[in-house]
Image (cartoon, helix red, strand yellow):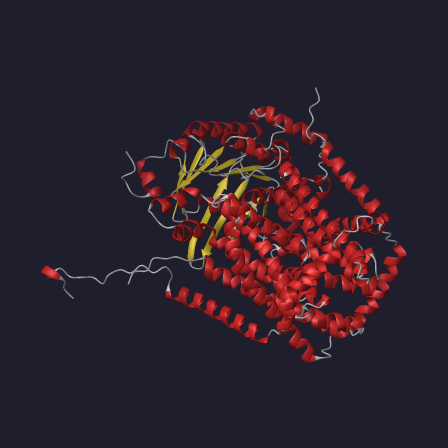
Amino acid sequence: MTATGSDQAALSVRGLVKEYVRGKRVLDGLTLDFGGTGLTAVIGASGTGKSTLLRCVNRLVEPTAGQIVFGGRDIVPLSGRALREARREIGMVFQEYNLVERLSVMENLLSGRLGYMPSLQAWLRRFPAADIERAFQLLDHVGLAAQANQRADALSGGQRQRVGIARALMQSPRLLLADEPTSSLDPRTAVEIMELMHALGREHRIPVIVNMHDVELARRFADRIVGLSGGAVVFDGTADALDDDALQRIYGGTSWMQ
Amino acid sequence: MKRVAFKPDWLARAGWLLLVAYVVYAVGRLDFSVERFVTGIDNGARFLGRMLPPRIAQPDSLVSGLLESLQIAVLASFAGIVLSLPIGLLAARNLMPAWASWPARAVIAAARSFHPVIVAIIFVKAVGFGALAGIGALVVASIGFIGKLFAEAIEEISLKQVEAVRATGAGFLNVLAYGVMPQVFGRFIGFATYQLDSNLRNSTMVGIVGAGGIGGTLFSAFQRFDYDFVAAILLCIIAMIMVGELLATWVRKVFVDHGRVDEE
Amino acid sequence: MNGAAGVPATLPRRWQRFTPAQRLARFTVYLAVVLAVVTSVRQVEVIPEFLLDAPEQMQDLLSRMWPIAWDHYPGGVHDALVDTLHIATLGTLLAVLMALPIGLMAAHNVVPSRIANQFAKLLLVSSRSVNSLVWALLFVAVFGPGALAGTLAIAFRSIGFVGKLVGEALEETHRGSLEALEAAGAPWLSRLAYGWWPQVKPAFWSIVLFRWDINVRESAVLGLVGAGGIGMALDTAMNLFQWNRVAMVLFAIFAVVVLAELLVTQIRKRIL
């Protein structure tokens, strides 16, 4: 399926509120729209709700109030099968990769298709030929074709994250979320991963929303930067517009800036 | 060139096939027939009917039997734990010379070789019917279990810590107390409480061969076809063991989380 | 309070190994143990004559057992021994089949309902609390004497063991990979197959092997109550006071248990 028209938002967050503890709002009525393509970086100090925002989108965390409009409908009240159908269209990349260590790279990749097939078939590993072909193509694309049958725990951090990204793309998602995907990687690998996500997002024409704490990385790769502080949006613009004032607003304090 | 996503695991497939073949063979050898099973289910339904509602036919017998089982478990565990501490220590090859560790290991191996029921039968022959035979059998079982695991735990400790204590000039017993025991005491308590549970379970059963406890009451109820009394006894046994498990967990908590500096 | 030269003295700091609450708890345990032991010793009936008689009795028994009746093996022992192994193996397999769903239900991260968890745990405790010999008595009463009763007894007793350990292994799994599968929209059964099972597999096989080893020991004595296997040969020989044959049976049981343990150790080394 092609992406929606560039006017219509792929994801619309409206008045999102999250309280982990009653009375303490981690997200305070956020309203954001995410367009058809492009990489958006969400930045902010620790605990300001970046991760919560992303996890509310695919309901790994339950919002306290608000709407999340994806694919034309609010997904907050969904449950059961409808929720799974919504989730399979949203790919997620995790900080700790979250692969199944004892399974092979290929099996991890194909587990991205689990939302599309009946359990018995999945158990017997009877994936459609088209899926398998697609998996091999993605593996080629991320440069891991040779490791297809190796166990996931035999791979390095950067390699595992590539598998994670490929797995998310196997879902043929309409949106890609990434929760601090580079925080566990060395600087060079972090750049490679960001490049990969940026390129793949472009190629598959889906919006990519990345949570990160490295401002320089955000500046380098993001088409749009959203800065959170105290559970609210305090900056929303391009990398060029991100000046010291803006950073002050987002992170507070001055001693860390040069 | 066609690439294969999943290599068929021939070893695993062969394994499963072998398993299925074995089951078919064994079921045949043991003469399990469908009719027997069906009549059994029928019997079972009737049996269940006779067991419910549970009825305490002989309260005195029930209470004294349960108490006796409890006593057997307590004494056997106490003696067993006390004995397995030194025996287990002696059996640790990294701490003890061969002339100490080999006999200790032999004792532990012998203690483990036979089922407590068989040991109970032998004790009955030696000291007569009654709780003493049961206690003896379970002491042997405790030594076998705790001794083996304790010795293995000691063999896994870091000898560097032991050396450090030895280097301070401490005598042998102090080395044990400050170098060895802190590393293994937690696990020892774990094994001891597990064995306490195990002895409690076994104490309910050795009575079947005359070694005291509720097992005797249960067996005679069976032979008299007093199935509702059997049900009552079983429920009491289950309850007793559940309480035992809870107590064991509590004891573990008390003894394994320890050591805090207190300022006054 | 001032010390020398006007420097305020603080109370000396004491190092206590345990807090007062912990000390009280430990003391309670010690007290309870002493009470339990003392009351038990008082109540247990020990007939001194029997105790003194014991060494003589043992000697008598041993002399009657020697020489071991090796010739008894082919006729009376071999088939029963093989039956015992079948009982142990089939019983373990059956137990695994029945224990898996219950073990799943007991793990609160697989089935998040507290009621279901408690119910499953209750089933598992009950299975463990009833000794395999007692299960055997029950099944002999229902299905009649023979190996069927024995196999079911082994199976029902083992459910508690396998179910409890599998439940614990499940509760210790890595959350992250399961989160990823959930986020991808995978249904529950698929998450089981791809997320739980690969992580639990090594622990699972270890538990099954461990239980099989124990079950070989247990199966050997079930025959004493008529549930098939070598225990029946033992029972017959004891009832007829044929102590040489009893010795043969005991030796056979010993040999089989040792072999089973060797087998399990070897498999553990290779596969786990």
In this rendering, the answer to whether B147 lies above or below B15 is below
**Which quadrant: the C terminus of chain C?**
top right
Q: Residue at x 67, y 57 (%)?
A: C160
Question: Would residue A4 be visible to someone looking at this image?
Answer: no
In the displayed structure, does residue B59 sit left or right of residue A31?
right
User: Residue B160's spot in the image, x, y percent?
Assistant: 41, 42
Q: Residue at x 50, y 55 (%)?
A: B86
User: Residue C108's spot in the image, x, y percent?
Assistant: 59, 55
In this rendering, the answer to whether C28 lies above or below A222 is below
Q: Identify which residue, C109 or B99, lies in the foreground.
A: B99
Q: Identify which residue, C168 or C52, lies in the foreground.
A: C52
Q: Identify which residue, B236 or C260, lies in the foreground.
A: C260
Q: Identify which residue, A76 or B167, lies in the foreground.
A: B167
In the displayed structure, does residue A128 sit left or right of residue C76?
left
User: Residue C166's spot in the image, x, y percent?
Assistant: 63, 51
**Which quadrant: the N terminus of chain C?**
bottom left
Q: Residue at x 66, y 52 (%)?
A: B113
